[in-house]
Image: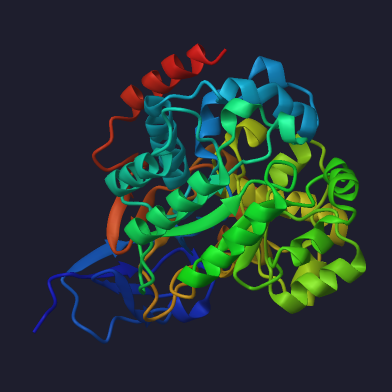
Amino acid sequence: MQNPNTLWIKHPLATLDAACAGGVVVQGNTIAELVPAGGTPAMAVDEVFDASGHVLLPGLINAHHHFYQTLTRAHPVALNKALFSWLVSLYPVWARLHPEMVEVSTQLALSELLLSGCTTASDHHYLFPAGLEDAIDMQMAQAHRLGVRVHLTRGSMSLGKEQGGLPPQSTVQSEDAILADSERLIRRYHDHGEGAMTRVALAPCSPFSVSTELMRASASLAGHHGVQLHTHLAETHDETEFCLKMFGMRPVDYLESVGWLSNRVWLAHGIHFNDDEIIRLGKAGVGIAHCPSSNMLLASGQCPTLDLETAGCPVGIGVDGSASNDGSNMIMEVRQALLLQRLRYGAEKITHQKVIGWATRGSAACLGRNDIGEIAVGKQADLALFRLDDIQFAGAGDPLAALILCGAYRADEVMVAGRWRVRNRHIEGLDLDRLKARQRELAAILR
């Protein structure tokens, strides 16, 4: 009997894997069959999508972001500054966030990601001033509304200026409050199962904004519940100097001292490691979310991606906060990764296939998942399809290479868990013009 929920995405223009050159069959929320070039499905299908004009990719996976920062893109107080002075300038601005700002900025960031071919997004939210105690709940509601797969991290800051940290006191919380809310969120939202749409990770913000005790307690709580851990690490030389002054050790040594050197951990940035630290990180299986645009905009440096991969670290890609990238476009971030990493490793080692792999399988591995990030039978039907009919593609040869080299900006069709979420470059059921207008109004309040 024919399954009424079976779709053949037929004969794509190009794919990453020749095994699905004839397309894929989606049944329910998973991939049921790969069709070889020129072939037809072995199983019965009741619907066909003609993909002959589309490049077909696994849905892109954003391994690091700060959704709320879409409200402070190109903010006047933060222009032309390196990380520490950039943060000090923006912390007081972010301290003025209110619930609607979190809701709208989350919806806008997820929409921008979806439109760029992203099907799974991780967010690192660490700001909980008075009135925003339920910020993660607000984000979960918006992700459910848009049908995006999310790994939301319960961030935290407990080390304010009075304790020698960078954040103002109004943005930090007590450790008891942080841990209690972390456990509440895990119990309420974390889905350990295959195909999970919502997962929670614990994410003390950085060594310069949380205490050693909170780092240890977060690791213990995450281990008890079997969830991932996330933080910023080794982003700048200033951070290394802070760790040496505050803790008497370098960032990776500090990470090990608080029980974070494990394959349940993925780090944002991971730029300033020495050779020994790379070996230790790889041996432990620590993941690295490479954030090329942010690293360039803040002049932080270049992540040693290939060295980390060779050592055993999963490497993924994150757009980082829109205030340090000024965009949430995942396919553009893939191109940035190619360009920045070619400066370090050369053109032959950093290929378009390599960077797409970071943004799919690599990011999935950082998040501790093996059910997303690739087009294979039994994997989740998270797919992004891109047409090459915009002006920048005119005259392009290899379609898969052109997607990255010529600067794809927007996906035409995006599927999450077998459901179309973007059709013909529009998000199903969303008034994007209205959303953008409200975002502009809220952003103006913060200037």
- Of all residues shown, which one is farthest toward the left? 1
Which one is in front, 33 or 416? 416
Which one is in front, 343 or 74? 74
Residue drawn at the location 35% of the way across and 57% of the way down: 189
Quarter where residue 350 is shown: bottom right
Residue drawn at the location 90% of the way across and 45% of the way down: 245
Q: Where is 156 relative to 129, above or below?
A: below
Residue 356 visible to an observer of this rendering: no
Question: What colouring does the structure picture have?
Answer: rainbow
Q: Is residue 375 left or right of residue 323?
A: left
Q: Where is 420 relative to 5, above or below?
A: above
Image location (x, y in percent) of residue 201: 50, 58
Quarter where residue 135 is shown: top left
Q: Quadrant of the C terminus?
A: top right
Image location (x, y in percent) of residue 24: 36, 73
Residue 23 visible to an observer of this rendering: yes
Q: Where is 337 relative to 347, above or below?
A: above
Image location (x, y in percent) of residue 272: 85, 54
Quarter where residue 105 is shown: top left
